[in-house]
Amino acid sequence: MPNFIFLLICISFIFVRNIKKNMRYFRLLRHLLVLLFPLYLSAQMPKENFSLLSYKKLKELYKNNEKDQNKQLIYAKAYLAKAKKDNVSIEKARGWYFISLIHSGDKAIQYLDSTISYSKNLNDLNFPAYAYSRKAYELKYQSKYREAIDNFLIAEHIAKKNNPDFYHEVKYSIAVLRSEELGETNEALELYKQCFKYYKTKDVKSDKYSYAYQDVLFALADAYKALKQSDSSTYYNKLGYKESKLTKDYEYNALFILNEGANLVEKKKYYTAIDSIKKALPKMIYYKNIANLLASHYYLGKAYAGLGKEESAVQNFIKVDSIYSKTNKITPEFTSGYPYLISYFKNKKDKEKQLKYLNQFLHIDSLLNNNYKVLSKKLQKEYDTPNLILEKENLIESLQSNRTKSYWGIAVLFLLVTIATAFGFYQYKIKKKQYAQFEKLMNKVKEEPEIKTSEEVKEVKSVKSGIENIGINQEIVDQILQKLNHFEQTKGYLISNITVQSLSETFETNSKYISKVVNVFKEKTFIQYINDLRIEHALHALKEDHRLQKYTVQALALEFGFNNAESFSTAFYKKSGIKPVYFIKQLEKSYKV
């Protein structure tokens, strides 16, 4: 193909020389040359051989193409392929991590688990801590807050050993999740203080630390505002404003102005608050900071409501709802506008809008109630839930023009209530049964299971031998039983991927002999025997080691010798009658009592 193009170009040049006087043909051929010559050049350019590039170069190419994920994926895959070829675990981990950054959700988590698998126990400066932290964020985006915290805690624990900067980044992330997603502001404040103390020892005006330091200042100011400690909030807002001015971080500068405006609303200094918020609002729009754009309109709404300017308050609260409708993201802090809108439209006798915002408020409650204890208290205080539901029903009834539809609605509601009641009763029975099984396990798991002595092993062997002859030399049976007893004492069953073949090589005997001895003397298949030992150990370990209770099911599976969470959960349920998640949850409750 390249030679053919070159030939065409040569012929064209000759042809042009002969017909130079004919300008029409000359222009035609000139366009042809313009088209063909780049093709010839590109055909002559060799394709880059990624396998010859260094890890540093591939990483550099990956980072330089942040705006082109297709190219990033090519370089990430090339990086991983090189790592696999070189068989370097840490580079494999980094390759999977690069790929994970291009994805989101479950796909990203899958790649991050590969990163964790390859970098575990390598004592690397960045991995697997980065992977656990990134996984926590993906879980957070899925509203799996408790699982997110579990992964943040693991990342924090790992980073504490050799990476103090990242250790405090993770600590900050945990604090944000606890304050903004779980409403645990007091607990978060202590973590923010620890981060603040750390960054005060650094050069906070440098590019390396300025952003993280201002993050913490903003978080401290926001937490004190939420706790109604307005003077402390003002102190950190002023400090943050000063720092952001010095470092020329214009977005954060506007954020500190906004946060102080919100703080002034809490102080009931409404006019000054409105002035501050309106100064910050254009910057929120410019930087497309949606979360704080929502906050701007919410606090403007509160300020106008405080001044008795209903129309302006309603206008801003409606903007809050509009932003939530587009993003599906809101925190309990910004829900108070809904009762205001409901009351406003009720007084205006606009039943349709009253019902619209009432439905929205109840919808938000149903979504966030499991994660936000604060919101439940807010509902009870500002708008008792039963009254909301009753008001909703009355509104629906008054808006119905057709009585038949109303009857159908009541019938469906009654059916739903009946189904919900039946389901609730069923769930109650299941939970009662599970708890009884948990108590039974707790009574059983008092201490480590006793390992049989040599004499007891011989006695068991003697009894079984008296029952039946298993067709194996008695001396070999004795040896296998003794080795199995030692295997149990040393917890050899925690090694993953153990098989009867691998164990027979360790015991230096026939795999069929081990299988038969386990069948007869342990009265189980080999797989059941290994899994039961692992689960018995897991029950004791989870009860005694509180640290393990913070692990994910996947991490526990690996800890106790299983290859994945599913096989661990199945074996745990088969042995104990309950799922590991339920067992851990009840353990945590029992320690809190």
Image (cartoon, rainbow, N blue to C red):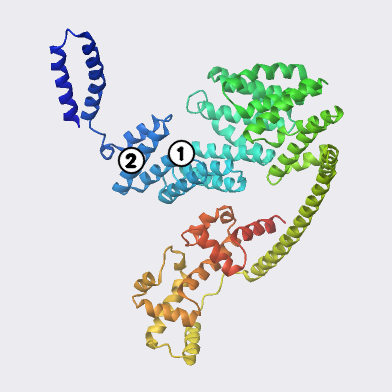
Say which of 195 and 511 sits in front. Answer: 511
Q: What element carries label 2?
A: helix
- Dot 1 amino acid type: Leu
- Quadrant where the C terminus lies? bottom right
Q: Which residue corresponds to the image point at 80% horizontal and 24% vertical from the top-left? A: 305
Q: In which quarter of the image is residue 251?
A: top right
User: In the rendered view, does 334 fall on the left or right side of 118?
Assistant: right
Disc marking residue 411: none
Label 2 or label 1, whichever comes before in sequence order: 2
Kindly give the residue lying farthest to the top in the view shown: 21
Q: Is residue 475 above or below residue 242?
A: below
Q: Which residue corresponds to the image point at 58% horizontal and 58% vertical from the top-left? A: 545
User: In the rendered view, does 86 fall on the left or right side of 220?
Assistant: left
Q: Which residue corresponds to the image point at 44% horizontal and 68% vertical from the top-left? A: 492
- Quadrant where the N terminus lies? top left
User: In the rendered view, does 355 fall on the left or right side of 113?
Assistant: right
Q: What element carries label 1?
A: helix
Q: In this view, does 341 lie above or below 366?
A: above
Q: How far apart are marks 2 and 1 (CA)?
A: 15 Å
User: In the rendered view, does 515 fall on the left or right side of 186?
Assistant: left
How packed is label 2: few (under 14 Cα within 10 Å), some, or many (20 or more)? Answer: many
Q: Where is residue 559 in the image (x, y as percent from the top left)?
A: 49, 58
Say which of 459 and 215 sits in front. Answer: 215
Q: Where is residue 234 in the image (x, y as percent from the top left)?
A: 69, 24
Q: Where is residue 18 in the image (x, y as percent from the top left)?
A: 13, 12
Question: Can residue 298 be seen from the camera position used here?
Answer: no
Question: Can residue 553 be seen from the camera position used here?
Answer: yes
Q: In this view, does 132 lie above or below 535?
A: above
* Residue at numbered disc 2: 78
* Residue at numbered disc 1: 101
- Dot 2 amino acid type: Ala
How packed is label 1: few (under 14 Cα within 10 Å), some, or many (20 or more)? Answer: some
